[in-house]
Structures are given as C-alpha cells and as structure tokens.
Image (cartoon, rainbow, N blue to C red):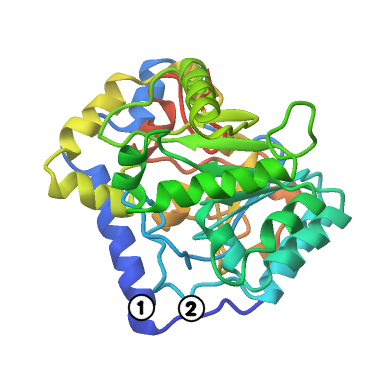
Amino acid sequence: MNLPVLSLKRRGSELAAAANQVEILSSGDLVRFDEMLKQHELSTLIADQIEILQVNVGKLCNMTCQHCHVDAGPDRKVENMDRATVDACLKAIAASDISTLDLTGGAPEMNPHFKYFVSEARKLGCHVIDRCNLTILLANGFTDMPQFLADNEVEIVASLPCYLEENADSQRGDGSFQKSIKALQILNELGYGKPDSKLSLTLVYNPVGASLPPSQESLEQAYREQLQQRYGIEFTRLFTITNMPISRYLDHLLESNQYDDYMQKLIEAFNPAAALGVMCRQTLSVSWEGRLYDCDFNQMLELGVESSSPATIDQFDATTLNGRKIVTGRHCFGCTAGAGSGCQGAIS
C-alpha cells in the first residue's frame, strides 16, 4: 500500500504542528498521565480485542467549528481517503472480529467513497456509525444522504453542543443551529430517534467554555424536554464529551490564556474508574492515509501505535494489535476527567 502524499510542504507543516502540540502538552510542571496512573496503582493501558474500527475518512468539512480537534474545514480538500485504503479497511474487518465501523471526519459524508464504504461494511454484517455534523444533510449534493443512512440502518452520532441557539452558534457558526434542527426533523421523519426504532440517533454535547461537561444523565433529560417542547424532536441518547486540548481548541486555550487552568482542571478531576473504561482499549483508529493509531486524538498528534505493531491498515494483524501497549500523553486527562469522556460519552 502506497501512502498518499499531500505535498512535502503541507505534510511537513502538519508534522511540525503535531510535534509542537505534543511539546506544549508535555511541557511545564503539570503531572504526566503515566505518573497519575502509578499514583492510583493503575497499570499501563493495554488494548483488549479490537471491536471498533474508527476511520477518519478525511478532513474535508462544510463547517469550521471552534472546538474541532481535527482542524477540519472546507479548505481540506486533498485529505480524503482513497478507494484502496477503504478496501484495506474492509479487508481488515472481514479478517477479524471487528463488529463496528465508526466513520468520522471532517464531514465523513463528503468523502467520495462514503456510500461504498457503508454498503460494503453492512454486507460484512458490520454495525456502522456516522459521526455527522447534521448541517451537511441539507447541503447541495447531500440531500439524499438521510434516506441512504436510514436504508442501511446506520447509527447517527450528531454534534449538537447546546439546545439553545445562541450557545450552539457561538461554537459552530451563525445559522448552524437552525440547520441542525431542520436536519434532526428530517431524520425523525425517517424514524431516527423514535421509540422502538432500529434507527439510533445520538446527540453529542460538548462544553461551550473551558469547563467539564455536567452530568450526562441530567443533561440528556434537559435536552429531551427542550428539544421536544421547542421543535418536536426526539432522539435515542445523549453523549457528553470533554473538549480535548488539541489542534483548534488548543489554539483557542492558548490565545485566551486558559491552557494551564484548563489542564489543571482536567488533572484534578482524574477518575480512576474512567481510566479503566477508556474506549482505546477496544478501538483502533485509522487516518485518511491509512496510518494506525490508538485513538482519534493520538491521530491528530501523530502519535502512532507502538513501534512493534503494524503501522498501516494494509498491514493489519489482529493478533499483533490486540494486547498492544496504548500510547498515552497529557491529553489523555481529557478522557479520564470527571465521569470520563470519549467518542462513546461518559464512562462512569
């Protein structure tokens, strides 16, 4: 498998940016993540059997959200997974016990092979998750996407940082909230989020400011009441996710002089129970280029899987990857603070 190359200048710039972020996250007098594990008599994180293949199919997106740890946007047109890499992912699923394909981006629907990827994964009996920003479902060329997702029983995990328009728009851009509401109503009409429906619709909340999410259970109830009363919207569940100090959100923290305080807040809220339940134990992350990582956050920091493991998806070997040592860093405090956080919401 030949890894796609952007340009030496662009690739070098991305590597330099990732290295700079790792240096920022590692510097200072703040406690390291591995030290915190030792303090709580917890062992090094080791991967279990891979159950979820989380694939970032590209950084192209129709939005430019303030909290985005991927730094996705309309200008990231080159960074899109090609058909050969998609097929390598499908081959890995077919040759393993992976039961879930978790597609993310960018806006994953904007990848030209998205529908092929979904259809072929479903043929393999794989449960498919689409991490959707909702507004893409109203964009020109994508209005047929809701029906396609429903026909393939794709689970939709959709970002909606608040049920109040002003708060949501402050994070995702003016007008994004009303577009999201319209998209949710379309999905409801197709059966998504309805009681006893096979079509699962999960909403995702992340704080607007530099704070930890509130109780997932209580916030879900508030979302249900507000969205039903105001817009007649139903959904399956709510995930709360902590903003990760990576990429665009890291820049925001540094520019607003909140980085040290935010990191200290995450460290002080460390939860051993959350550390034991982190999703990287059952997940393998794949970049648009086909490189392998322990999680989507490590991917953005260019922290690949440990050197003894296969480096790319075409080298996939479940026996070698199961039981690998997970690469950690100070950003991991974002997944272990409070009730815990990750792509599957609160942990404990």
Residue corresponding to mark 2: 78
Residue 166 figure quarter: top left
Q: Are marks 2 and 1 in contact (CB under 8 Å)?
A: yes
Of all residues, the one furthest to the left in this rendering is 257
Q: Secondary structure at mark 1?
A: helix
User: 66 or 234: nearer the eye?
Assistant: 234
Position in image of residue 195 (x %, y %): 74, 26
User: 134 or 105: nearer the eye?
Assistant: 134
Location of residue 305 with respect to 87 vertically, above or below: above
Are there few (<14), some (14-19), or many (20+) residues within 10 Å of tag 2? few
For image coordinates 81% across by 49% down, the residue present is: 96
- Quarter placement of the N terminus: bottom right
For image coordinates 11% across by 42% down, the residue present is: 257
Q: Report the mark closest to the observer, 2 or 1.
A: 2
Residue corresponding to mark 1: 10
Position in image of residue 95 (x %, y %): 83, 55
Are there few (<14), some (14-19), or many (20+) residues within 10 Å of tag 1? few
Q: Secondary structure at mark 2?
A: loop
Amino acid type assigned to the residue bearing label 2 in the image: Val
Position in image of residue 150 (x %, y %): 76, 50
- Left or right of 322, for residue 15: left
* Label 2 – label 1 distance at C-alpha: 10 Å
Amino acid type assigned to the residue bearing label 1 in the image: Arg
